[in-house]
Structures are given as C-alpha cells and as structure tokens.
C-alpha cells in the first residue's frame, strides 16, 4: 500500500453496509420506543400520584428502564 492509497481512503466518506445501517435503524427505533414508553409510564405515575392512587399498581414492567452505558459508572476512570 502506497501513501497515496492512505490519502485516498482517508478522503472517502465513511459509509455503512445496508445490513449495518438496518441494524442501526433498529437500534434507534428500539431506543426511541423505550423512551416513549418511559415517558408514558412517567405521565401515568404523575397522574396517579396527583389523584392519590398508587403509581406502582399502574406500572406493569421494568422493561422500560435500561442502562445508559455511556453514563455508566464503569466508564468513569
């Protein structure tokens, strides 16, 4: 490989394969769906609390709560 090859490849725009692009789209759709469900649960809990009900009776699953690995304590150095 010559130095010209390095320059050419560095100048080319980065692209994802169709399969990788689809996987990334799926990841973002799942993330956005979890965020939407979380916001719905939050609104339900707030409404229940305002009405004097127990919010825990309305929350059916912890699946809406996920770990944010970018904010995880394991990445703090």
Image (cartoon, rainbow, N blue to C red):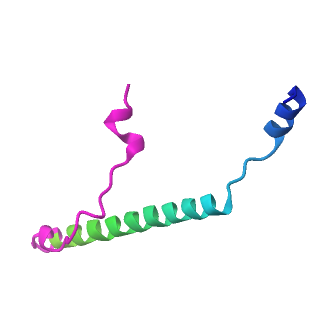
**Which is nearer the eye, 36 or 15?**
15
Region rendered in magenta: 49-77
Left or right: 74 as drawn, with respect to 56 = right
Depth order, front residue of 59/69: 69
Occupied quadrant, residue 75: top left
Relative to 1, is 12 above or below? below
Q: Which residue is rendered at x = 32% and y = 65% of the image?
A: 38
Q: Nearer the viewer, residue 23 or 70?
A: 23
Residue found at the very far right of the displayed protein: 4
Residue at 9% from the left image edge and 72% from the top image edge:
52
Quadrant of the snapshot with the C terminus: top left
Compared with 11, 63 (above or below) is below
Which SS does the magenta portion mostly show?
loop
Please name the residue shown 87% across and 26% down the image. 3
Q: Is residue 4 left or right of residue 62?
A: right
Tell whether 3 sits left or right of 60. Answer: right
Where does the image place residue 43, in percent across and percent down from the top left? 28, 69
Residue 20 against residue 3 in the figure, above or below = below
Magenta stretch containing residue 25, yes or no? no
Quadrant for the N terminus, please: top right
Which percent across, then down, holds residue 66? 32, 55
Of all residues shown, which one is farthest toward the front? 1
Residue 63 part of the magenta-drawn span: yes
Q: How many marks?
A: 0
Location of residue 16 by image quarter:
bottom right
Up/down of 10 relative to 51, above or below: above
* x and y percentages locating residue 55 in the rendered image: 15, 69
Q: Is residue 32 left or right of residue 56?
A: right
The answer to which image quadrant residue 54 occupies is bottom left
Residue depicted at 37% across the width and 29% down the height = 76
């Amino acid at each position: 490989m010559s130095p010209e090859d390095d320059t050419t490849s560095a100048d080319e725009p980065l692209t994802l394969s169709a399969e990788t692009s689809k996987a990334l789209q799926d990841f973002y759709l799942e993330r956005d769906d979890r965020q939407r469900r979380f916001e719905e649960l939050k609104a339900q809990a707030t409404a229940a609390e305002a009405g004097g009900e127990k919010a825990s009776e309305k929350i059916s699953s912890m699946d809406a709560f996920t770990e944010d690995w970018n904010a995880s304590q394991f990445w703090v150095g």
